[in-house]
Image (tube, coloured by chain):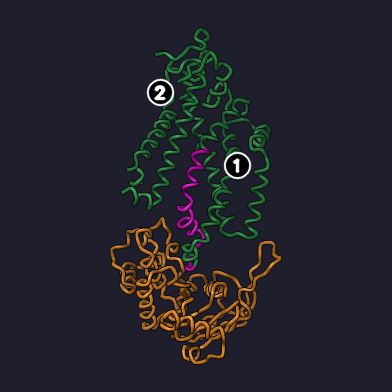
Chain colours: A green, B orange
Amino acid sequence: MKKLLKNKFAVLGISIIALLILAAFFAPVISPYGQSEQNLYQRLLPPSSEHFFGTDDLGRDVFSRMIYGSRISLAVGFISVFIILFIGTSLGIISGYFGGKTDSVIMRFTDIVLCFPTFFLILLIIAFLEPNIFNVMIVIGLTSWPGLARLIRAEVLSLKEREFISVAKMMGIDNLKIFAVHILPNIISPLMVYASLAIGGAILTESALSFLGLGVQPPMSSWGQILTSGKDYIYIAWWLSVFPGIAILITVLAFNLIGEAIRDVFDPKEEYVRK
Amino acid sequence: MLISVKNLTKNYKTESGKVTVGALKDVSFEIEKRKVLGIIGESGSGKSTLVRILSRLENFDSGSVEINGKDIYCFGKKEFSRTVQMIFQNPYASFNPKLTVGYSLSEALEKNCKNKKELIMNKLALVGIDEDILDKYPHQFSGGQRQRLAIARALLKEPDILIADEPFASLDAVSQSIITDIFIRIKKDKKTNIVFITHDISSAFEISDKILILKNGNIVKYGTIDDIKNDRTNDYVNELIEADYLLEQ
């Protein structure tokens, strides 16, 4: 952790995420207007000192809606990616490490899940379940792990042939400890890259679902929902699409910075070279 | 008997299962305690497969392998780790690059072991490495140093048998002689028995008591150094000895 805080990119990334989380937490205090406060006399106003990010087609303050929306977007990003990481990494490691029949069974199952177009699968499940944000997070998590599982399996396949894994086996170390101490730190870089991209992906998937009316339910807002609703007015009200877009960009970037920094922390060689 | 191998056969199959390659064909030999066994053979002769079977890193098709009179698959995981330890050919890959050497070494000891540091220092002294290395990472060492660290780690388990798979192969001449010295020291200690692979018959003569020569998965010759030097009936053995003689000249 100390090493992580020495890395200035990591500090930048962590501060951005911390700021976003604080904003989400204190949304009612920070936002100048209510989430669904409408004022039809002030429709589609450009950014000004009164409405920092302008107003939407119902005269709602975009800045306030984005602050409230950060709650949803961050939660979707975090929770669904956590589920993806958990399932993808464990199945990938088990499959790659044990090989043989275990590998075949897990990989065929992965192929089956991969065959379904993820987005339509999500649509189908959400249509059956109640369309609320909680279901969206879980369904995104449960359907988006196959790519990661395959990536991790490939990494583990090459890793387990390395001699230090054989040494660990010969030392009589438990498989779980081999996974945690010898395998996980050595696959952390692809894992982190995947995770930081997946967070952005999850936020966008949620926005697409919200656009179809299956994600957050009005009058609640999320970044994706503001972004997609803004596309109808892109020629006359650019602020509706640009600000949520920038917010998503900054969030994904911040996670990327943290991911990159964690990778460096786990790579002693890199640090040695930099010294 | 320390190791007793009977009718050991191992085939490798291609992924489709159509072609099988016989790595070991009906191999039988025994070695008693306190004897160093050198295994010699060209690439593909089955020597690595043999030691990987001895260290349970590979299964075999038929036959039996016993250590101290007990089938190797009857050992528990922990028990086996105190019976057989192995050093690999490539010292660059035998340490986890993300962990400090100190951590890697202490993994060989039990979690609650009280005098961990003392035990580690003992073994490091045996392989001639200074003590202030515990916080360093593997990439900060040369190949020869890593190989010595790997030996120290294996010895921390106090194994009955130390298997070394071509321990000299990727090292320079100086490191080779240092490691040869370490093996001779281990041999004198009489705690650990050594089995080692080499393709260099002169280093085999230097350390071992008995030599096993493999070719294409068959035993060409098995016996003491004198047996091998004096018996000139086998062409392959002759070839090996003559090649070594030429090199020395």
- Looking at the image, which residue is at 48% across and 68% down? A170
- Amino acid type at circle 2 is Val
- Whether residue B58 sits left or right of residue B112 in the image: it is right
Was residue A186 drawn as part of the magenta stretch in this picture?
A: yes
For disc 1, the marked residue is A142
On-image quarter of the C terminus of chain B: bottom left
A53 to A155, vertically: above or below: above
Q: Closer to the camera, A274 or A111?
A: A274
**Quadrant in which residue B104 is drawn:** bottom left
Q: Secondary structure at mark 1?
A: helix
Q: How far apart, in angstroms, are the residues tagged by discs 2 and 1?
A: 34 Å
Magenta stretch, overall SS:
helix
Instruction: Indicate the chain on which mark 1 is placed.
Output: A
Q: Is residue A88 visible?
A: yes
Label pair 2/1, CB-CB below 8 angstroms: no
Q: Is residue B75 visible?
A: no
B46 to B139, vertically: above or below: below
**Magenta-drawn segment:** A170-198
Q: Closer to the camera, B161 or A216?
A: B161
- Whether residue B136 sits left or right of residue B163 in the image: it is left
Q: Closer to the camera, B229 or A153?
A: B229
- Amino acid type at circle 1 is Leu
- Looking at the image, which residue is at 45% across and 38% down? A256
For disc 2, the marked residue is A29
- Looking at the image, which residue is at 58% across and 51% down? A91
- Specify few, some or many for label 1: CA neighbours under 10 Å numbering under 14, 14-19, or 20 or more: some
A83 to A72, vertically: above or below: below
Q: Earlier in the sequence, mark 2 or mark 1?
A: 2
**Quadrant in which residue A261 is drawn:** top left
Relative image position of residue A52 (x, y in whole percent)? 42, 17
The circle drawn on residue B138 is none
Instruction: Indicate the chain on which mark 2 is placed.
Output: A
